[in-house]
Amino acid sequence: MSGKEKPVVIVGGSGHARVLINCLQLIDREIIGVLDPGLAKGETIAGVPVMGGDDVLLGYSPGRIEIVNGLGVLPGRRTRWRLGDSVREKGYSCASVIHPSVIISNNVSLESGVQVMAGCVLQNGITVGYDSVINTGSSIDHDSVIDAQCWISPGVTICGEVNIGPGAYIGAGATILQKVSIKEGTLVRAGETILEDVGSV
């Protein structure tokens, strides 16, 4: 762990948060605790203590910690994205989380709060916008752009020069062929193969 890395507080204690905790432990990132108003203070999530609800966050100055967004996403629900916007408005920064097994080119741009799970491959020239999540075993080929607040489900294949607009949800196992554009807020259903540009559904 770099000496410049701040400890993190995880907001949310669901299954996605547990995956992130495991990743953070593998890279030796210090975790202060979990915030989740639906969980009892003092219980543990994957060995990390629950500190209480969101109000506890205000006890930490923005310069002291970073936030890890532990909320998952379902199509059409924006709770995760609203959380990211809210903590930034309060002055906090969102930490990116990259699993150590990820294969990533040295010419990839990842904005703040990006999460890349185990077994992913990110090839040359890719850009991933803030808060987007690339879930387990997905691959993104050269010169593709994943805009902000996108959810890429497990096992997705994104070919070269694809553009995915902000807020898109790509279902598990979907395949998007080269040079296709996916418009803002689009839902690509699990297992679909996308051969041409698509808009909102």
Image: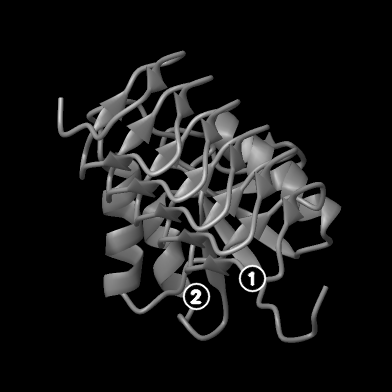
Amino acid type for the residue under numbered disc 1: Asn
Q: Residue at x 73, y 40 (%)?
A: 118
- Please name whichever residue, 50 or 177, is drawn nearer the observer in this view of the structure: 177
- Please name whichever residue, 43 or 32, is drawn nearer the observer in this view of the structure: 32
The answer to whether residue 43 is visible is no
Q: Is residue 97 above or below residue 136?
A: below
Tell me residue 30's x, y (percent). 75, 65
Q: Quadrant of the N terminus?
A: bottom right
> Is 7 positioned to the left or the right of 154 in the image?
right
Q: Which residue is mark 2?
A: 60
Tell me residue 54's x, y (percent). 39, 54
- Please name whichever residue, 43 or 191, is drawn nearer the observer in this view of the structure: 191
Q: Give the secondary structure at mark 1.
A: loop
Q: Which quadrant holds residue 7?
A: bottom right
Inter-mark Cα distance, 2 to 1: 34 Å
For marks 2 and 1 on the same chain, the one whose residue lies earlier in the sequence: 2
- Please name whichever residue, 42 or 58, is drawn nearer the observer in this view of the structure: 58
Amino acid type for the residue under numbered disc 2: Tyr
> Is 96 positioned to the left or the right of 118 in the image?
left
Badge 2 crowding class, 10 Å Cα cut-off, few under 14, some 14 to 19, many 20 or more, is: few
Q: Residue at x 28, y 45 (%)?
A: 167
Q: Is residue 134 above or below residue 126?
A: above
Q: Is residue 6 above or below residue 130?
A: below
Q: Residue at x 47, y 68 (%)?
A: 111
How does the figure colour the protein chain or chains?
one colour
Q: Which label was assigned to residue 88?
A: none
Q: Which label was assigned to residue 107?
A: 1
